[in-house]
Image: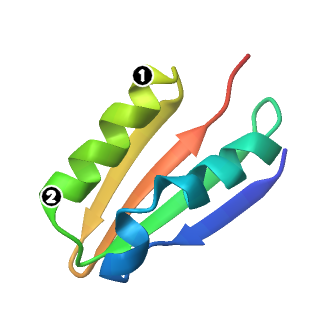
Amino acid sequence: MAKYKFNLSSKENANNFNNINSYLGIMNRNDDLTISLGQNSDSEMRYICETLQQKEYQISINRKKEKNEINIRKFE
């Protein structure tokens, strides 16, 4: 099981889902990916979560002051 981390704390990155897709493409069964959103808006977090759920990834959200993270696990 591998663990990956992707930082989307800047506004330019948050709208570029292709970067996230690159990570998803290398994930294997039971791998974990943490996407750090920093202070990006709730709408960006919601968009990313909805897109991941449509692709049937299991996600959880960790909201701490100034550190919004989406944790993703791939199951097949």
Name the residue at the top extreme.
76
Q: Which of the two residues, 76 or 52, is positioned nearer the viewer here?
A: 52
Picture layout, residue 6 above or below residue 25: below
User: How busy is the neighbourhood of tag 1: few (under 14 within 10 Å), some, or many (20 plus)?
Assistant: few
Q: Quadrant of the N terminus?
A: top right
What is the secondary structure assignment of the residue under circle 1?
helix
On the picture, is 27 further left or further right than 9? right
Q: Quadrant of the C terminus?
A: top right
Residue type at mark 2?
Answer: Asp
* Residue drawn at the location 24% of the way across and 82% of the way down: 66
What is the secondary structure assignment of the residue under circle 2?
helix
- On residue 42, the disc is 2
Name the residue at the left extreme.
42
Of the image marks 1 and 2, the number of the one nearer the N terminus: 2
Residue 42 image-quadrant placement: bottom left
* Residue drawn at the location 58% of the way across and 68% of the way down: 6
User: How busy is the neighbourhood of tag 2: few (under 14 within 10 Å), some, or many (20 plus)?
Assistant: few
* Residue drawn at the location 69% of the way across and 53% of the way down: 23
Number of labels in the image equals 2
Give the percent coordinates (x, y) of residue 63.
26, 62
Residue type at mark 1?
Answer: Gln
Q: Which of the two residues, 23 or 57, is positioned nearer the viewer here?
A: 23
Give the percent coordinates (x, y) of residue 34.
55, 59
On the picture, is 58 further left or further right than 75? left
Give the percent coordinates (x, y) of residue 69.
39, 62
* Residue drawn at the location 41% of the way across and 26% of the way down: 53
- On residue 33, the disc is none
Q: CA distance from mark 1 to mark 2?
A: 18 Å
Q: Which residue is mark 1?
A: 54
Picture layout, residue 73 above or below residue 62: above
Give the percent coordinates (x, y) of residue 27.
78, 42
Picture layout, residue 46 above or below residue 53: below
